Image (cartoon, coloured by chain):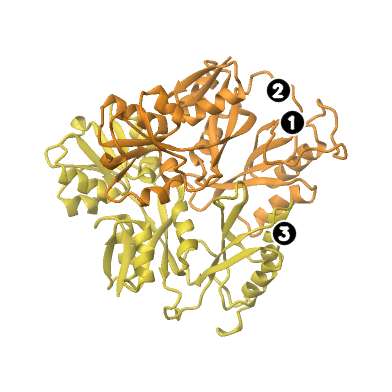
Chain colours: A orange, B yellow
Amino acid sequence: MTVAFQGEPGAYSEAAGQIYAPDATLLPCPSFEDVFGVVESGGAALGILPIENSIGGTIHRNYDLLLAHDPTIVGDLELRVVHSLIALPGTSLAQVRQIYSHPQALAQCDRYLRGLPGVEVVATYDTAGSAKLIKDRQLTDAAAIASERAAAVFGLRVLQTGIQDFADNITRFLVVASRGAEAPTRATNKTTVVFALPNQAGALFKALSVFALRDIDLTKLESRPIPGRPWEYLFYVDLAVGAEDFRCARALAHLAEFAPTLRNLGSYASTLSTRTPTPADPVVAAGEPA
Amino acid sequence: MTVAFQGEPGAYSEAAGQIYAPDATLLPCPSFEDVFGVVESGGAALGILPIENSIGGTIHRNYDLLLAHDPTIVGDLELRVVHSLIALPGTSLAQVRQIYSHPQALAQCDRYLRGLPGVEVVATYDTAGSAKLIKDRQLTDAAAIASERAAAVFGLRVLQTGIQDFADNITRFLVVASRGAEAPTRATNKTTVVFALPNQAGALFKALSVFALRDIDLTKLESRPIPGRPWEYLFYVDLAVGAEDFRCARALAHLAEFAPTLRNLGSYASTLSTRTPTPADPVVAAGEPA
């Protein structure tokens, strides 16, 4: 099985893919869009995409691409992120004049970077890609913020490790598959949906009521602008409910009564951030009409 | 009066400041943090900060800084953003190999950039700053995405204009003042608050009910992670209600009954995105206890 990820070998997304599917072949892709594309075309069975970091926040681009490409979410997982400052062998911390990394990684090391006066911070599109850049261009006065594994992959040396501002720096990844792919066999306990609402007072409150009145917990709510329609939003919601639970389909049917747009992005088995289902939960057999 | 903004002369924030306070002196600052700092220290009466773009979405950093610095919001305004591709005189479009701009501007011109194969896109911290970089380094094979005014300021030539993907590309700015500053004299019609919620099922629904049950419309809801507390969020909410309306204080007192954190970031007179108050609205005299 092939799992596509964005970045160079040594990227955090690659590590997440190895945890999710230990026997899979990991396929590096230049952009998030390419990950969606290769899954859509059948070039990879799964794609792994960072969706949220506990410090930096949501990776909005991937929410936008979920809607543009229409895959189905089949899982999620968390990865504890430990950032290192890495450089060419022979480069000391005192010699570093430029630090390259992805804006999210830079944001996660904000306090550390402020403690390095006279160093220019350069935003790039990738953590491991920054390591590659330093190696390819043989930059002796530069360092990258990336994983220790990226240092090993590109023959760089670790100057400092654990440089993120908070020890609890966790990235959550979504695992996506093509809509036509085989359905997962594990019982699901989480569902992600996206919807737009009519431009009416109280519309969001009414939307959340379809879940709250059925005791369905929201684990995340994210709003994104609708391009071309200023100050109208799409809402992405993670629900602590699986497809086998009759409340899921009922709540979504209720929401569809007044939401002009509603799309189910997938129900999946998550071991994260959701309450573990108990025998008391009203779970019906898989195969119940959804 | 001095109004601080982030960026170089020719930045969109500078244009917004000129619209908000036509007689003010505009003070360029290297970072958003510096804008908050100079307002806090009294070096500028007001600061102007982009908070949301109708295509790119929220500028999350400024929400985080609002909480870290504790100014008061005294106004907001919208600016229609028209991006141009600008370069040194003599550089033609065919010669451009690198395009520099802020990630938000790059995202707003995504489709345009895809139509330029073989061009490297480089993210920087500023649109007008990218124009300055091209001038300072005399980059003859590069262009910046910035305003026409930035081209004029730095002696660059406009290669193409209106290159954003959507004509309706609008940025909303907040105007902030120090907490100790004189209160605005205009009647307010909008209030921004931030709160955290207990980690309980239905907590967000309950929070929104304090507004919905009082017919207070939400014009925006944004969630941000709480650093160091994975998957717990702060919610930033814009309410279409002024401080003079008794429902505002009552709703916030109600929310404070169960929200462990609640801060009022300011009530202000907005001409935007909010319903215009009508004589039928239950408005009481200014000075009513809040």
Q: Residue B161's image quarter?
A: top left
Q: Residue A147's image quarter?
A: top left
Chain identifier of the residue bearing label 1 in the image: A
Residue on which the image places disc 3 = B206
Secondary structure state at the residue bearing disc 2: loop
Chain identifier of the residue bearing label 3 in the image: B
Q: Are marks 3 and 2 in contact (CB under 8 Å)?
A: no
Q: Are marks 2 and 1 in contact (CB under 8 Å)?
A: yes
- Figure check: A107 above or below A8: below
Taking the view exactly as shown, the residue that stands out farthest to the left is B90
Q: Which mark is residue A79?
A: none
Chain identifier of the residue bearing label 2 in the image: A
Q: Which mark is residue A188?
A: 1
Secondary structure state at the residue bearing disc 3: helix
Q: Residue at x 56, y 23 (%)?
A: A18
Q: Can you see residue A7? A: no
Quarter of the rendering occupied by the C terminus of chain A: top right
In percent of width and height, residue A267 lies at 70, 32
In percent of width and height, residue B70 lies at 47, 67
Q: Which mark is residue A184?
A: 2
Secondary structure state at the residue bearing disc 1: loop
